[in-house]
Image (cartoon, rainbow, N blue to C red):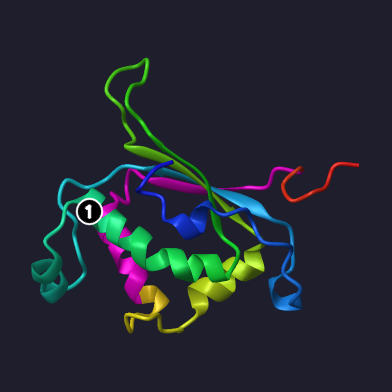
Amino acid sequence: DDDRVPEVLQQPPPPPLSRDAYSGDPFLFLHLVQFREQAIYPSVQEQELFDLTGREAMQRFDELSAPVKAQYGIRAAGWFDVLYTFTGPPYYDEIRLEYVPSLGAWGVLLGGQEVDENGLTVPQIWTNREAAVDPTDSISAILFPSSIGKEEE
């Protein structure tokens, strides 16, 4: 049990979404994350308002995005701190796996202009993630394991 992973993202994945726009093959997002020492926000106002480290900005992103992600069936499959690598100091700070029920659900989420309980839209919430991670050294990839979401026969 890790306090950093929002409770709503620790729940089992919901049953397959019934809406046609969201149906499809589930996948995992693999995130290899390297945090910035200091978060870099796109505007001077945000930079002065938040004045956070990269880890703190990611925590803010996690807190704000968890309820929105959960509405679309997204769950944390695994979040791992990188403490040691056999080649030397860790290059990445975290490795994250997130279950996503379909590309359609992910696209609707990212394209949405829904407002959360704080009055923020999805793009506004995602600025915290962008501020938190080093874009030249962090990597995200989509993995389509054939067994995700399939019942055993």
Return the residue found at the far left.
Answer: 48
Residue 130 visible in image: no
Local secondary structure at mark 1: helix
Give residue 130's position: percent from left, percent from top. Answer: 31, 60
**Placement of the N terminus among the 4 image quadrants:** top left
Residue 37 visible in image: yes
14 lies left or right of 130: right
Decide: few, some or many residues near mark 1? Use Cα within 10 Å; few <14, some 14-19, many ≥20.
many
Of residue 6 and residue 73, the one placed in the foreground of this image is 6
The question of residue 86 being in magenta is answered with no
Above/below status of 128 relative to 86:
below
Judging by the rendered image, the residue that carries numbered circle 1 is: 56
Give residue 44's position: percent from left, percent from top. Answer: 11, 72
Give residue 9's position: percent from left, percent from top. Answer: 50, 56
**Placement of the C terminus among the 4 image quadrants:** top right
Residue placed at 76% from the left, 76% from the top?
20
Q: Quadrant of residue 24?
A: bottom right
Residue placed at 38% from the left, 80% from the top?
121
Residue placed at 27% from the left, 23% from the top?
89
Please, what is the three-letter code of the amino acid marked with disc 1?
Glu
Return the residue found at the far right.
Answer: 153
Q: Quadrant of residue 51?
A: bottom left
14 lies left or right of 142: right
Above/below status of 130 relative to 33:
below
Give residue 138's position: percent from left, percent from top. Answer: 36, 45
The question of residue 128 being in magenta is answered with yes
Q: Which residues are magenta?
A: 124-146
Residue placed at 37% from the left, 15% from the top?
86
